[in-house]
Amino acid sequence: LNNFLHDIATGLWLASFFLGFEINRRWGGHNLITEIQKILFTIWLIALLIIILTGIVRRKTYTNYLYGVEIETRRKTILIIKHILFGFLSLGGVYFFIKWL
């Protein structure tokens, strides 16, 4: 269940960011659009919180060495890089949502 929530929240997080970006690009500046973007920002923040909390649980409970220690070590390195990139995307999202609202 934790992995499912983590993955679903990640999809929702990305979708709300890109939807907000596209809405702003096409129709930015109208009062109704600003209200929609506030809702999307709230969804984005809740999804990010779920991602962080379930990610912590995922990290603390992961013990699968199905492919061997060497491959799992590489996998963890790749996961760290991926999360750093998503961290920068999060900061960009905060910047854009603040700019829009």
Image (cartoon, grey):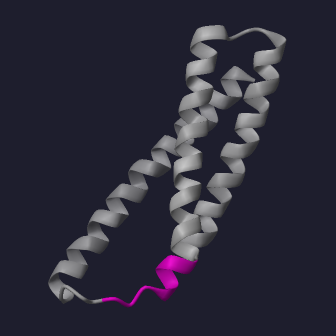
> Quarter holding the N terminus?
bottom right
Q: Magenta residues, as a range?
A: 57-64
Q: Would you say residue 95 sits in the magenta stretch? A: no
Residue 99: percent from left, percent from top: 67, 23
Taking depth in this image into account, of 22 and 78 the one nearest to the observer is 22
Q: Quadrant of residue 40?
A: top right
Q: Residue, x 73% and y 27% (percent of image)?
A: 37
Taking depth in this image into account, of 13 and 100 the one nearest to the observer is 13
Residue 32: percent from left, percent from top: 82, 16
Note whether 4 is above or below 16 in the view shown. below
Note whether 55 is above or below 10 in the view shown. below
Taking depth in this image into account, of 8 and 71 the one nearest to the observer is 8
Q: Quadrant of residue 74?
A: bottom left
Q: Would you say residue 60 sits in the magenta stretch? A: yes
Taking depth in this image into account, of 80 and 54 the one nearest to the observer is 54
Q: In this view, does 88 lie to the left or right of 80?
A: right
Q: How many marks?
A: 0
Q: Quadrant of residue 17?
A: top right
Note whether 44 is above or below 69 in the view shown. above
Q: Residue, x 71% and y 37% (percent of image)?
A: 41
Residue 88: percent from left, percent from top: 46, 44
Residue 18: percent from left, percent from top: 53, 31
Q: In this view, does 6 lie to the left or right of 86?
A: right
Magenta-highlighted stretch: main secondary structure?
Answer: helix
> Quarter holding the C terminus?
top right
